[in-house]
Image (spheres, rainbow, N blue to C red):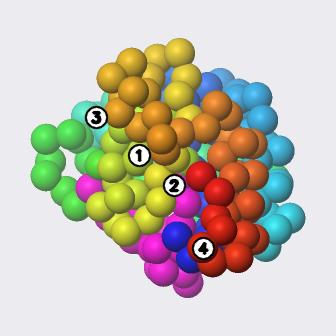
């Protein structure tokens, strides 16, 4: 990867505690290191965004407005990200935006004015990493206790123990001269 211009984070289980089908901004809790990781990316001039599947809308369990309010609360706690993009479709809708398809990453990159290849996508499940790959971006898995063991094993060489480490590694890779990038 030649350089990172944007860091795109998954929302639930990556930046905030995963509360299934959360429509209540009062239940938003940042995960440890989330605000620091976003701030570190911004401090180094990287654009930041969220790309998130929100199938609760397509399932009739949430409204778009509820998701927006939850996103606004998370954005407030994180200090403000540059873009928020979410897929409102149910898993069987066959849309192009639902991760592991590339649509969310492509949309976020376009909104940020960067090429998908300049994006780092950080998430807690294989769909996040696979969506990054499908878009031509770099994906990093930051496992949590509910990440499937086979996903952790599959993406062991594309993982980081936490968000802050994932962002730091991306910054190191961006700063390293060509041919001397760390892994």
Q: Mark 1 vs mark 4: give the one in front.
A: 4
Measured as percent of width and height from the top left, residue 131 is found at 35, 54
Q: Which residues are magenta?
A: 101-121
User: If you read the primary sequence from the N terminus, does the residue marked by circle 3 or circle 2 appear first?
Assistant: 3
Residue at screen point 33% across, 49% down: 130
Measured as percent of width and height from the top left, residue 91 is found at 21, 40
Q: Secondary structure at mark 2?
A: strand
Q: Secondary structure at mark 1?
A: helix
CA separation in Å, label 4 and label 2: 22 Å
Q: Main secondary structure of the magenta part?
A: helix
Mark 4 = which residue?
179
Residue at screen point 66% across, 46% down: 166
Q: Residues within 10 Å of mark 3 (few under 14, many from 20)?
A: few
- Determine the image quadrant of residue 57: top left
Mark number displayed over residue 128: 1
Q: Is residue 115 magenta?
A: yes
CA separation in Å, label 2 and label 1: 7 Å
């Amino acid at each position: 990867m030649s350089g990172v211009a944007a860091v795109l984070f998954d929302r639930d289980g990556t930046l905030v505690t995963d509360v299934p089908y959360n429509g209540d901004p009062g239940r938003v809790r940042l995960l440890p290191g989330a605000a620091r990781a976003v701030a570190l990316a911004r401090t180094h001039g990287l654009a930041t965004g969220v790309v998130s599947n929100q199938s609760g809308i397509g399932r009739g369990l949430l409204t778009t407005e509820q998701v927006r309010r939850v996103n606004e609360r998370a954005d407030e706690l994180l200090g403000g990200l540059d873009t928020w993009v979410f897929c409102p479709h149910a898993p069987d809708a066959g849309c192009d935006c639902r991760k592991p398809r590339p649509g969310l990453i492509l949309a976020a990159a376009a909104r940020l004015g960067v090429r998908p290849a300049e994006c780092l996508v950080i998430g807690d499940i294989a769909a996040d990493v696979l969506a990054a790959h499908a878009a031509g971006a770099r994906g990093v898995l930051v496992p949590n206790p509910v990440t499937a063991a086979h996903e952790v094993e599959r993406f062991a060489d594309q993982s980081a123990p936490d968000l802050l480490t994932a962002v730091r590694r991306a910054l190191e890779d961006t700063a390293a001269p060509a041919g001397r990038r760390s892994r």
